[in-house]
Amino acid sequence: MSDQVLYLLMSGVNAVQDRMTATANNLANTNTTAFKAQRPVFTAQPYYHQGQPDRVATQTRDQGADFKPGPVAQTGRSLDVALKGQGWIGVQAKDGGTAYTRNGALFISPTGVLQTNDGHPVLGQGNTPITLPPLSSVTIGEDGTVSGVVAGGDPSKVTSFDRIMLANPPAAQMQRRTDGLFGDASGAVQIDGNVQLQPNALEQSNVDSVSMMMNLIENTRMFQMQSGFMHSFTSLGQGAQSPLSLQ
C-alpha cells in the first residue's frame, strides 16, 4: 500500500508541474501575436500488477489550447491581417506539410514569397506558397486576395496574384505542433470561403495575464503541499522500519 500512495502523490506532483510549465509559457507569450493559451490535457494511466490494475496515475496526454480569439489591434500596415472570428491561415511547415496559424504579421521575402514573421510560407488556393513579383504596393482583401502594383508598372493597374488559403477545421481536430503551428488531425485540407480577414490589423495573444498569475500562485502552493505530503509519508515509512520503532 505504501508504494501505491507514493505513486499517487508523485502523479499529482507531476501533473502540477505540467500545469506550472504551461502557465509559465502562457505568461511568456502574453505579447506574442495571435498566441493561443496552453491547456494541459490529463488522462488516467492504470498500472498493472499480476494482470490486475494496481494503481492509477495521472499523465499529460496533450497540450491543448484555448481557441478563444484574442483582441484585435489596428496597425495600419498593409501586410498585417487578423482573422474575423474563427478560422486559420494555411502555411507550409518546415517539413513541407500544411499547417495553420492565426499569426497575420506577414512579410515578403527577398525571393518574393509571402510568409509569416516566423518564416513560414503562406499558402494560396493551390496549396502552394504564394510567390509575388517585385511590387511598389500591396494589399490583402477581406477574402484573402493578394493584390498589388508591379514595380515600375502603371500605378493605376492593380493585379490580383493569389488568394490566401483560409480554413476553419473543427476545433476538436486542431492540435498544437512543436513548431508553434497547429495541425488538423484529420489530415484533410479544407478551404473555407466563409472565413474573412480584417486588413491592417493583428490579433493579440488571448492570454489573460492576471488569471495566469493567479494560476501560477495556486499551482505553486499545490506543488508545495503535495511535495510536503511525499516527504512526510517517506519519513513515516523510514520511521516504521527503524529499530527504535520496534521498542
Image (cartoon, rainbow, N blue to C red):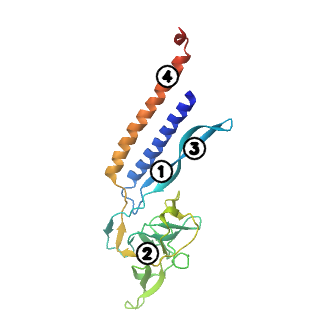
- State the residue position of label 2: 195
Instruction: Looking at the image, tell me whether mark 4 or mark 1 is earlier in sequence order.
Output: 1
Q: Could you tell whether 30 is left or right of 11 in the image?
A: left
- State the residue position of label 1: 40
Q: What element carries label 3?
A: strand
In the image, what residue type sits under mark 3? Gln
In the image, what residue type sits under mark 1? Pro
- Residue located 43% across and 37% down the image: 223
Instruction: Looking at the image, tell me whether mark 1 or mark 2 is earlier in sequence order.
Output: 1
Cα separation between marks 3 and 2: 39 Å
Instruction: Looking at the image, tell me whether mark 2 or mark 4 is earlier in sequence order.
Output: 2
Q: Mark 4: few, some, or many residues within 10 Å (few <14, many ≥20)?
A: few
Q: What element carries label 4?
A: helix
Q: Is residue 14 above or below residue 211?
A: above
Question: Residue farthest to the top?
Answer: 247
Cα separation between marks 3 and 1: 15 Å
Residue 111 picture location, percent across and down: 51, 75
Cα separation between marks 2 and 4: 60 Å
In the image, what residue type sits under mark 4? Ser
- State the residue position of label 4: 235
Question: Does residue 119 appear in this view?
Answer: no
Cα separation between marks 1 and 2: 28 Å
Residue 197 picture location, percent across and down: 39, 75
Instruction: Looking at the image, tell me whether mark 3 or mark 4 is earlier in sequence order.
Output: 3
Q: What element carries label 2?
A: loop
- State the residue position of label 3: 45
Residue 66 picture location, percent across and down: 42, 58
